[in-house]
Amino acid sequence: MTGPAEPTVTAAEAIVAPSPPTTVGAAGDSGRKVRRTIGYALLIGYAFLMLIPFLWQLITSFKTNPDALRLTVVPSPFTLQGWQTGFLTLDPSIPQLFLNSVIIAGAVTLTNLVLASTAGYAFARLRFPLREFLFIAVLGTLMIPDQLRFVPVYLIERQLGLITRNPINYVGVVLILAVEAQQLFLMRQYFLSMPRDLEEAAKIDGAGHVTTFLRVMLPLAGPALAAVSILAFQGAWNGFFWPLLILQSQDHWTLPLGLFSFRSEFRTDWPALMSVTVAAILPILAMYVFFQKYFVQSVASSGVKG
Amino acid sequence: MAAVTVGTSSGRSAGRGIRGERRAEMLTGLAFVFIPLLLYVFLYFGAMVYAAYISLWRWGLRGPRAFLGIHNYEQVFGDPIFWKAVTNTLYYVAVWVPLTMALGLFLAVIVNQGLRGQTFFRAAFYFPTLASSAAITVVWIFLLQPDGLFNSARAVAGLNPIFQALGYTDNFNWLGSSRTAMNAIILLNAWTTSGTVMLFYLTFLQQISRDIYEAAAIDGAGAWQTFRRITFPLLRPAHFFVATLLVIGGFKLFDQAIIAGGRGGEPSNSLTTIVLFIYRSAITDSEFGYAAAVGVVLFAIIFTLTLAQRRIFGEAPSW
């Protein structure tokens, strides 16, 4: 895992400031030019391959149903039928799914921020018994696959009364995603890389540990907190497995779950279905557009795709 | 550094002395890690032990019904659908992992050439990662249905004769045929994950000193030779890292399988992965003991494979 003080090139830097062309091959200028052109062509082709499905889904959401199956780029007629179905007819409707996703993703982001930063700080800078052992235990959780633990976790939550059609069901999902080892690790790495002078200065001024954390270390951990927020939010927003397992009532479904259920119900109303997928992707896309820098950084510093 | 002005009662170091100071630090530290550790104990380690315990029983919605010992495990190994799930998953991992690695590496090598438009490419390749597995799978289903974009596009491009020769009709239902459903999922996930893999390889590629390439160029090495003899071997830590990540991820295949194939892994269980199988046993059949047993078996498989991978590829690089 790379932290801010790493001397080697992080993926973030690699992408932000690409290395100059490596001189590969002695074939001479023309060979290199051909290679570059092919390279460009391939990259552009692949990039379009990446984007086409999403563009197609956006376009389809504005088509009528029969038109949706045609190979046309421009909807004719251009209609909001699909979106209307999505907002009014579907049950749960797009706004409801959206709200549920916001609630869960928001809560998970909050808990991760609070718990990962405090625990990360403690593991990085506070001395307490068994610290190293406990940290290894935290890392150990990464080795335990969800597939092994979801049956017992489900039963445990059942016994705790969290598997219910009651709104407290949300807690069941949030509890599972509340603080991920990945985020804790990230915060710890970041705190480790901060100079000790800060804490020493605070100590000299008579600050206790909590105050030092809240007034000095935390405010300076901006980039790491941003990374945690993005990873947590994105993971929770897009999450499918745990919400599917834990959420019992259709009214509480998140967008991905809605898509799953609609897929079988609305087999043929593609514009409506596409409108839901667009709604599902839009927030993350918006976040990406505005916070692109932080996204790349968080991928680089986490080293693991959510 | 600006001085921290503390006017609250939390400034304790003055009065208590070193002992008190240490104790305060200890308590704060433990308090800070308490909740996460509590969660981890219950939802990870405790769960693991609990899973093993559950697997020894016939366990329904109302709780344990009968102690079965290892009977669940015997049943698991004798269950043809379990084995179908295992072969499906193994097939998926065996094909998807190398494919995605190759794609990611290929992209990384090209991007590493220092071509312009990096921001655009980076954004484009990372795009699928931003969408949820649900959204992507639904779009994929839409594209691959009999009258979907893929079939229409290949008709327009005049490629149908080739497909017919291979045995695929003009309106072939790619996700509806047990022959091709899993392959369609493999392609979907290879496409989605290639961007992230590209980023990983790019990090490692950037760390290879340019001097090596210059030396190779002086020695008259061609592009492919340089790649095969220098770049590829030097990327060993990267291969290991990516492969481990992908293999573990591959065994977890669930979202796309259930969205495309439904709970039954249609058609005819061709999309039933191990995880989907566990899910079905637990949630649809309410056989929690059985499901737990399969989970334990799955864990054992992943664990063994990770160890084997270490043997084959050598120790993982320490981060």
Image: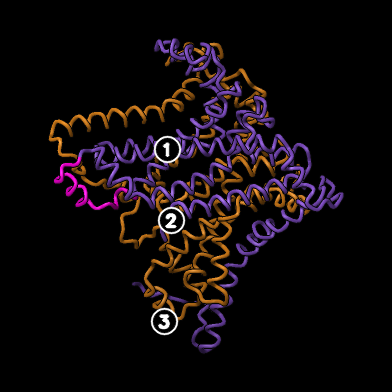
Dot 3 and dot 1 within a common chain: no
Q: Position of residue A28 (x, y in %)?
A: 13, 35
Q: Position of residue A164 (x, y in %)?
A: 76, 45
> Does the image show residue A20?
yes
Q: Position of residue B127 (x, y in %)?
A: 43, 36
- Of the residues shown, which amino acid type is indicated by label 2? Gly
Between B311 and A22, the one nearer to me in the picture: B311
Q: Which chain is purple?
A: B
Instruction: Kindly check if marks 3 and 2 are in contact, taking CB atoms under 8 A apart as contact.
Output: no
What kind of element bears circle 2? loop
Residue A246 to residue B4: above or below: above
Q: Over which residues does the magenta segment extend?
A: B204-221
Residue labelled with disc 3: A204
What kind of element bears circle 1? helix
Residue labelled with disc 2: B314
Q: Is residue B299 left or right of residue A209?
A: right
- Of the residues shown, which amino acid type is indicated by label 3? Ile
Looking at the rendered structure, which numbered label has been put on residue B41? none
